[in-house]
Image: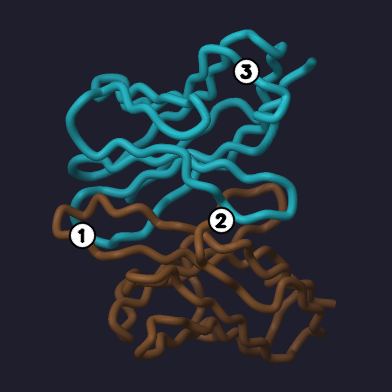
Chain colours: A cyan, B brown
Amino acid sequence: AQSVAQPEDQVNVAEGNPLTVKCTYSVSGNPYLFWYVQYPNRGLQFLLKYITGDNLVKGSYGFEAEFNKSQTSFHLKKPSALVSDSALYFCAVRGDTGRRALTFGSGTRLQVQP
Amino acid sequence: ETGVTQSPTHLIKTRGQQVTLRCSSQSGHNTVSWYQQALGQGPQFIFQYYREEENGRGNFPPRFSGLQFPNYSSELNVNALELDDSALYLCASSPILAGGGETQYFGPGTRLLVL
């Protein structure tokens, strides 16, 4: 079975400061890892993914994520937060074998204060 | 915008009724996945369709069923609605890549309320 943990229900950060949203995972085989963002009353918007290769992945809107195999983590980061980054962020995982379904974490609400 | 569309946007039904939700996939994508997102939770996988065949199913009862059509659009049908079926239903489309690293692109969702 595969699972994702997002240990923080909410992350608060001041505009202009760096932000980190944490994610750890459990999966059989090699992981495929994804970050999505959800704005109110909207579907999920893809930010970035790790499949293989460089552990630092760059995505949309200045976001990046670092894959750490030994710590089974895939934390989302941004050097300088914007008020418009305030939203709900989901980490998702699937293994490189078997069912091609994504398993999502419970989400982390990011609040960026002006 | 992803190019994945869903209809209707909102729906209100009563317990015991049946509902059909629709999804049009992004151009060039042959796979559609359906997810249920209850309030305050992450999306839960319902099932996936690839080339009109079910290609994996999550922990949902048989009253959740689906179809995929030759143009790769899809329907989710739920029979005998229960109050707990109230949720945002998300459709995602993707290609199938040999390496398996395809991205699923989500539509805006259908919000279902069961009274």
Q: Residue at x 56, y 51 (%)?
A: A44
Circle count: 3
Discs 3 and 2 share one subunit: no
Coordinates of residue B5 in the picture (x, y in percent)? 57, 71
Residue at which label 2 appears: B1
The lab-note entry on whether marks 3 and 1 share a chain reads no
Write down the chain letter for disc 1: B
What residue is shown with label 1? B97
Residues at marks 3 and 1, CA–CA distance in whole angstroms: 34 Å
In this rendering, which labeled residue sits more in front, label 1 or label 2?
A: 2
Q: Nearer the viewer, mark 3 or mark 2?
A: 2
Query: In the rendered structure, which disc, 1 or 2, sits on the residue that comes first in sequence?
Result: 2
Mark 2 closeness class: few <14, some 14–19, many ≥20 residues within 10 Å? few
* Residue B17 spot, x, y in % from top left: 73, 91
* Three-letter residue code for mark 3: Ala
Residue in the foreground of this view, choosing between B74 and B53: B74
Q: Residue furthest top?
A: A17
Judge by depth and name the residue closer to the eye, A43 or B15: A43
What x and y, as percent, mark residue B11? 77, 77
A27 versus B4 height, above or below:
above
Q: Position of residue B26 (x, y in %)?
A: 43, 68
- Residue for badge 3: A81
Distance, label 3 to label 2, CA atoms, is 23 Å
Judged from this view, the residue extending furthest toward the right is B115
